[in-house]
Amino acid sequence: MRALQYTTIGEAPRVMEVPDPDPGPGQVLLQVTAAGVCHSDEYVMGLSAEHYTMGLPLTLGHEGVGVVAALGDGATGFEIGDAVAVYGPWGCGTCRLCAQGKENYCQNAAVQGIRPPGLGSPGSMAEYMIVDSPRHLVPLGDLDPVKNVSLTDAGLTPYHAIKISLPKLGAGSTAVCIGTGGLGHVGIQILKAISGAQVIALDVADDKLELARHVGADHALLSNGDAPAAVHEITGGRGADAVFDFVGIQPTVELAGRMVGTEGDVSIVGIGGGKLPVGFAAIAYDAAVRVPYWGSRLELMEVLELARRGQIGVETETFSLEEGPEAYERLHAGKIRGRAVILP
Ligand code: NAD
Ligand code: ZN
């Protein structure tokens, strides 16, 4: 089969011919229908040899949907032909956090060498992929696979971040989304769907601000040093009740720290390496800073349900597997509107 693989540190990914995978005991073979292109892949492919730990060659793709093609011995719960979404943050399934469906925070995954697809295990940018357990599949039903594949990360990750802050986001509250790319443009819709907050979106390009307004942002502002004053003005001096930083670089975490109001939350979702110093007088009173990662299995079900009800949707640009490297180039150049999706 063909797979889009990262083969050499520092080089662009390439389409390679690799053996068709066979599902082992308990595993599920999917024929992949769509795979999402995430900025985290770019982060991974930007790591130096010293910091890169995912093994080479790496079949990319941690957002995946497909159709069950074969079941390994003892794998139950799905039938051949079922349309499914892959829950990507694989855990051990038995620790206290996995027991709550929070496999994204599994305590044993690292020690046991359990790696998410596309982030250590072979991912979804291939004609077929192995899913290690039926537990990591959620029925897609009649949801369009191409339109919804990115809900497995670009939907699930903001949903998880937002849900934690939901008690602070009642009517009359304000949420800020920094970065309105793949995650951010879904985050705005999730806020509008499940919270009472007005949403202020920040980005660096006018086309991204247009997208933010298109998906429901009440205000869309350029992300620069003037933005904190603008947020304070819009909120009558209170500041934001929650700031979701979907970029996470030093300038944006600093903006987030300046925008958050008393008792507000800052969620640093982007993995841009920014550090936000907190301490007395360094941030608003009783503000909390969080660093969420991906989301739980239940939250993925909830996100798919929001899509089923038409309350959220992903803006997509599609590419063939051969065009995969081009999708990453366009992402790098900031040219993707919403999410790039690869059709293997
Ligand atoms: P993306 O490239 O689709 O979107 C990033 C957006 O940020 C773009 O619209 C870009 O114009 C904008 N941006 C860049 N610099 C900015 C600035 N200074 N101020 C405001 N906006 C700015 O990326 P994505 O796939 O949505 O991922 C966003 C971030 O989240 C990445 O760092 C990614 O690695 C990370 N991520 C984290 C998790 C997690 O679990 N914590 C999960 C998925 C992705
Ligand atoms: Zn991702």
Image (spheres, grey):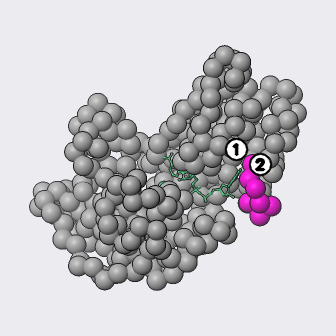
Place of residue 309 in the rendered image (x, y in percent of width and height, measured from the top left): 57, 53
What crowding class fits label 2: few (fewer than 14 Cα within 10 Å), some (14-19), or many (20 or more)? some
Disc ID at residue 160: none
Q: Residue at x 22, y 72 (%)?
A: 21
Query: Is residue 174 within the magenta segment?
Result: no
Q: Is residue 13 above or below residue 133?
A: below
Q: Residue at x 65, y 68 (%)?
A: 333
Q: Secondary structure at mark 2?
A: loop
Closer to the chain start, of discs 2 and 1, is 2
Magenta segment range? 202-208
Q: Is mark 1 within 8 Å of ligand 1?
A: yes
Pointer 2 with pointer 1, Cβ within 8 A? yes
Point out the image quarter for the C terminus.
Answer: bottom left
Q: Left or right? Give the position of 235 relative to 293.
A: right
Quarter of the image holding residue 207?
Answer: bottom right
Q: Left or right? Give the position of 55 relative to 273.
A: left
Q: Secondary structure at mark 1?
A: helix
Residue that mark 1 sits on: 251
Q: Amino acid at mark 2?
A: Ser
Point out the image quarter for the N terminus.
Answer: bottom left
Disc ID at residue 223: 2
Q: Is mark 2 within 8 Å of ligand 1?
A: yes
Q: Residue at x 66, y 65 (%)?
A: 334
What crowding class fits label 1: few (fewer than 14 Cα within 10 Å), some (14-19), or many (20 or more)? some
Q: Distance of mark 2 from mark 1, alpha carbons?
A: 9 Å
Q: Left or right? Give the position of 10 relative to 29.
A: right
Count of residue discs: 2
Place of residue 262 in the rendered image (x, y in percent of width and height, measured from the top left): 71, 21
Q: Nearer the viewer, residue 112 or 54?
A: 54
Q: Residue at x 16, y 56 (%)?
A: 26
